Image (cartoon, rainbow, N blue to C red):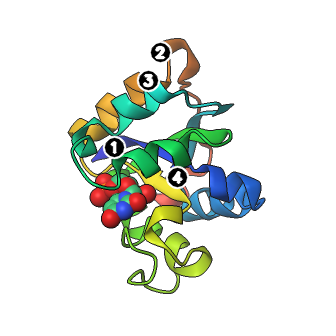
Amino acid sequence: MMEKTFVMIKPDAVKRRLIGEIIQRFEKRGLQIVAMKMVDVDKELAKKHYAEHKDKPFFKDLIKYITSSPVVVLVLKGKNCISVVRKMVGATDPKEAESGTIRGDFALEIGRNIIHASDSPESAEREIKLFFKNSEIFEYNMPDADIIYE
Ligand code: UDP
């Protein structure tokens, strides 16, 4: 099924100059970038994005982390890309994440796990709407689609 998912390259990854490395993995996999920008996440937006965690003990630190410097947000499109991208990202806690995943290759601690990706079609839709206007999401031809897909 053709899907769209939301990805955020978090402040620690931006500061560590990992933007290109991370995006390259998605492109090489065959996923299409249909939206992308660098943004400062303010407290209000951060709290909306992570609303489901508002009562968790780590919430305050999470908001501080995510608002600490600019992030890069993307919308990726591809077949089954919500679960494909979650697998590429790896377990929430990088010390449990498999090598070969983004967190498993570039991160060590749960509070500095470098990337976010939507975990369901509902959260993908909600998160894409939170960060992008419709006019910022593009549709364009992917000339190698016939090679990547059966
Ligand atoms: N987080 C944290 N401590 C925890 C659990 C989560 O700092 O004990 C942070 C971490 O940055 C994580 C985010 O909160 O990515 C959201 O947690 P979630 O369980 O939704 O994980 P994710 O979907 O990012 O893998």
Q: What's the residue at 44%, 69% (across, down)?
A: 110
Helix, strand or loop under label 2: helix
| Left-right relation of 148 to 150 | right
Indicate which label's residue lies in the foreground, 1 or 2.
2
Q: Where is 76 relative to 83, above or below?
A: above
Helix, strand or loop under label 4: loop
Helix, strand or loop under label 3: helix
Q: How far apart in space, not on screen, are marks 3 and 1 (Cα)?
A: 31 Å
Q: Quadrant of the C terminus?
A: bottom left
Q: Is mark 1 within 8 Å of ligand 1?
A: no
Q: Are marks 3 and 4 in contact (CB under 8 Å)?
A: no
Residue sitting nearer the eye, 122 or 27: 122
Q: Is mark 4 within 8 Å of ligand 1?
A: no
Dot 1 amino acid type: Met
Q: Position of residue 135 (x, y in %)?
A: 54, 13
Q: What's the residue at 41%, 72% (across, down)?
A: 90
Q: Which label number is shown at residue 31?
A: 4
Q: Around disc 3, counting alpha carbons within 10 Å, would you say few (fewer than 14), some (14 to 19), or many (20 or more)?
A: few
Indicate which label's residue lies in the foreground, 3 or 2.
3
Q: Position of residue 133 (x, y in %)?
A: 49, 15
Residue 76 visible to the viewer: no
N-term-proximal mark, 1 vs 2: 1
Q: What's the residue at 59%, 29% (across, down)?
A: 140
Q: Quadrant of ligand 1?
A: bottom left
Helix, strand or loop under label 1: strand
Dot 2 amino acid type: Asn
Q: How far apart in space, not on screen, are marks 4 and 2 (Cα)?
A: 20 Å
Residue 59 visible to the viewer: yes
Q: Which label number is shown at residue 2?
A: 1
Q: Which label number is shown at residue 134?
A: 2
Dot 4 amino acid type: Leu
Q: Position of residue 27 (x, y in %)?
A: 62, 56
